Image: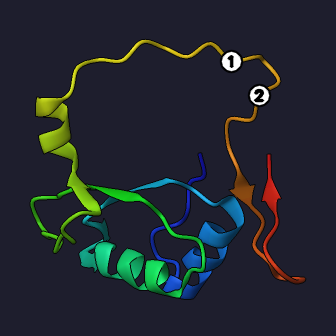
Amino acid sequence: HSVVFGGFAARELAIRIDDAQPKVLLTASGGMEISKIIPYKPLVDQALREAKHPVEKVVVFQRDFVQADMQDGRDLDWMALRETTAPADYVELDATDPLYIIYTSGTTGKPKGVV
């Protein structure tokens, strides 16, 4: 998985989506910086429109202080999923299998995904 700073512009997120090629994107409806509410979902929606890689599903954790609009057929509510799904068995992985893709800042060119 790859963790991305919530304050990124949609274009920066689209670049990372195209590089990592995820099937599923997890996001919160928004976040807070000191006393300012940052709606994340509109940035995600714009990034998905700009990205060439199609993401199959977007799972949204709806925060109480900012509710996100959901796209039918693509977006799933985190809490609804928790209520309707059963625990899954673990998948055994090798110690050398990648866990994270962390992206460099891209100050000297295109951001690079470091595994």
Please state which amino acid type lies under the numbered disc 1: Leu
- In the rendered image, residue 95, in percent from the top left (x then y), is placed at 78, 17
Contact flag, marks 2 and 1 (Cβ < 8 Å): yes
Instruction: Indicate whether 114 appears above or below 104.
Output: above
How many discs mark residues in the rendered view?
2
- In the rendered image, residue 106, in percent from the top left (x then y), is placed at 79, 77
Q: Which residue is mark 1?
A: 93
Q: Is residue 9 visible?
A: no
Q: Which residue is mark 2?
A: 97
Q: Residue at x 57, y 78 (%)?
A: 14
Q: Nearer the viewer, residue 24 or 100?
A: 24
Quarter of image, res 18: bottom right
Query: What is the secondary structure assignment of the residue under circle 2?
Result: loop
Instruction: State the CA–CA distance, disc 2 to disc 1.
Output: 6 Å
Please state which amino acid type lies under the numbered disc 2: Asp
Q: Residue at x 78, y 59 (%)?
A: 113
Res 66 label: none
